[in-house]
Image (cartoon, helix red, strand yellow):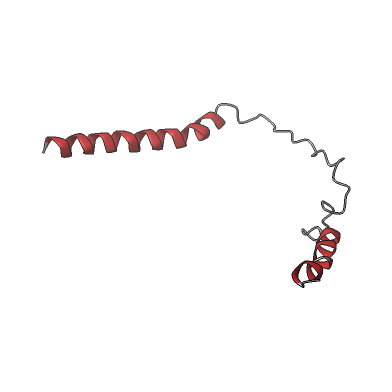
Amino acid sequence: MKKTLVRAVTGAALAGLVVLGSAAPALAAEAAPNDVVVVDEPDTSDLNNIWTFAPLGVPVLGLVQSLNGVPGRLLPS
């Protein structure tokens, strides 16, 4: 009986800490509601090769080059 009571109290305490921990960001955000978040543009100066140029979300030219080499690797010479 005592072990069950200790487990229940420990579980309730841990659940309370989880709730309090998840509410901390929301409570911190209320402290300064007039602050403006400024997000700078990402540095894309190094994204100019065929493996990172992805107008469709897939690096198209790199994908074509990669698929072009598949038959030579699958078929024995």
State the count of labels: 0
User: Relative to 61, does residue 75 appear above or below in the rendering?
Assistant: below
Seen at 51% across and 35% down, the residue is 26
Of residues 18 and 29, the one nearer the viewer is: 18
Residue extending farthest front: 77
Report the quarter where the C terminus lies: bottom right
Left or right of 75, for residue 9: left
Q: Where does residue 21 sit, x and y in percent of width and height?
A: 44, 33
Q: Where does residue 18 sit, x and y in percent of width and height?
A: 40, 37
Seen at 33% across and 35% down, the residue is 14
Seen at 10% across and 39% down, the residue is 1
User: Relative to 54, does residue 16 appear above or below in the rendering?
Assistant: above
Residue extending farthest left: 1
Q: Where does residue 31 sit, x and y in percent of width and height?
A: 55, 26
Of residues 63 and 45, the one nearer the viewer is: 63
Of residues 35 and 25, the one nearer the viewer is: 25
Seen at 86% across and 41% down, the residue is 46
User: Residue 59, located in which quarter of the rendered image?
Assistant: bottom right
